[in-house]
Amino acid sequence: MKRIIAGITGVNGWVPDYVLTNAELETMVDTNDEWIRTRTGVEERRILKGEGLASSHMGQKAVEGLLEKTGTSPDEIDLIIVATVTPDMIFPDTANIIADKIGAKNCFGFDIHAACSGFLFALTTGAKFVESGTAKKVIVIGVDMMSSIVDYTDRSTCIIFGDAAGAVLLEPQEKYGLLDSVHHGDGSGRDFLHMRAGGSLRPASLETIKNKEHYIFQEGRTVFKAAVNGMCNSVDEVLERNNLSKNDIDWIVPHQANIRIINSVANHLDFPKDKVMINIQKYGNTTAATLPLCLWDYEDKLKPGDKLVLTAFGGGFTWGATYLTWAY
Ligand code: UT7
């Protein structure tokens, strides 16, 4: 019997209209365009504005476009997995809200909460449902409304993050699709990147709000070093496990956290920059959305059989890499 693999058969992204430029950030905190560009690579990022709009709105838009592109009816969807650290609410899961908004009546859904590695982990999870024959059409969404948890008086974090959603359709394929993944975690990294309050450890109170504990805390330098190590090591690991050399790979798709991290990964692999997907300059770090947004941006450059390695690192710590061949 032929092995069923899960292939990405469509991708779509959605970003809000509002562009937060480096120039506007200069009016908000003590920073400057040159520092932001050279230290992070970000030139602008998108911010979701509007009463009642949250992550599910961006996810809905990304999926509606995906269904249209792929000629898929909402009724055909078996499963929706959402990777996010900014769900609309702690519960119910944003996947259920998106399913309702797009009119998907025959599916179930759940969220995965693995910060910037969320999409990578969700992609593997979705692929397992397809490979096992349990699901035929799985939608995996990476979405984050980082502006809802960013402190716009903290210059070390507010310059990096943006809001966006990206979504892929996974379907059973015989030839091309997800071939291997490595995933890692180290919970001791929680000290360096987290949102302290709002969970069961420190429920929201006047004190947590006064102490600004509902915002992202990041010890940038520590996370930077761990991100370079984690992404380089996991790419090496997935290449080695599949007897691949860098020359076999057509595209590296790295999480867009900092252009210097991306460059370090490319240099480590001695990989040509024009084969590394980069769009951090347009959107900043959109957490779980960066990988599908890259695939969406570069979709017209991809062809069936192209070998891609996706890699990410994020809060947790969480990190990993996925090797896949492009299906269309
Ligand atoms: O996506 C999930 C994982 N996250 C990451 O991978 C992010 C990893 N970390 C980073 O990207 C970088 O560490 C940051 C972009 C967050 C910070 O860049 P850095 O080069 O590590 O800067 P730093 O924290 O070492 O700060 C260097 C200097 C400091 O000034 P002093 O102490 O040397 O006088 C900061 O106060 O830069 C200062 N600084 C700024 N200056 C102008 C920090 N932020 C700013 C700013 N504008 N926005």
Image: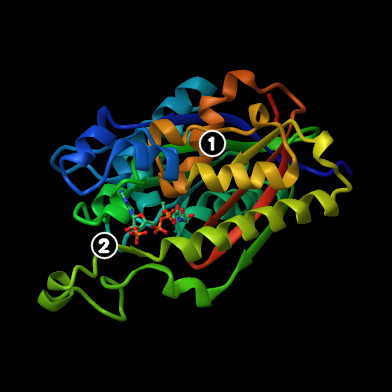
- Is residue 269 found left or right of 231 in the rendered image? right
Q: Residue furthest bottom?
A: 201
Question: Compared with residue 183, is residue 145 higher up or lower down, i.e. above or below?
Answer: above
Residue 315 visible in the picture: no
Residue 292's tag is none
Mark 2 lies on a secondary structure that is: loop
Q: What residue is disc 2 on?
A: 215
Q: Position of residue 161 (x, y in %)?
A: 35, 46
Which residue occupies 27% across, 58% down?
A: 89
Q: In the rendered structure, which amino acid carries the disc numbered 1?
A: Val
Quadrant housing the C terminus: top right
| Local crowd size for mark 2, using a 10 Å CA cut-off: few (<14), some (14–19), many (≥20) | many
Question: Compared with residue 225, is residue 54 higher up or lower down, i.e. above or below?
Answer: above
| Local crowd size for mark 1, using a 10 Å CA cut-off: few (<14), some (14–19), many (≥20) | many
Write down the quadrant of residue 320 in the picture: bottom right
Q: Nearer the viewer, residue 88 or 254?
A: 254
Q: Quadrant of ligand 1?
A: bottom left
Residue 168's tag is 1
- The colour scheme of the drawn protein is rainbow
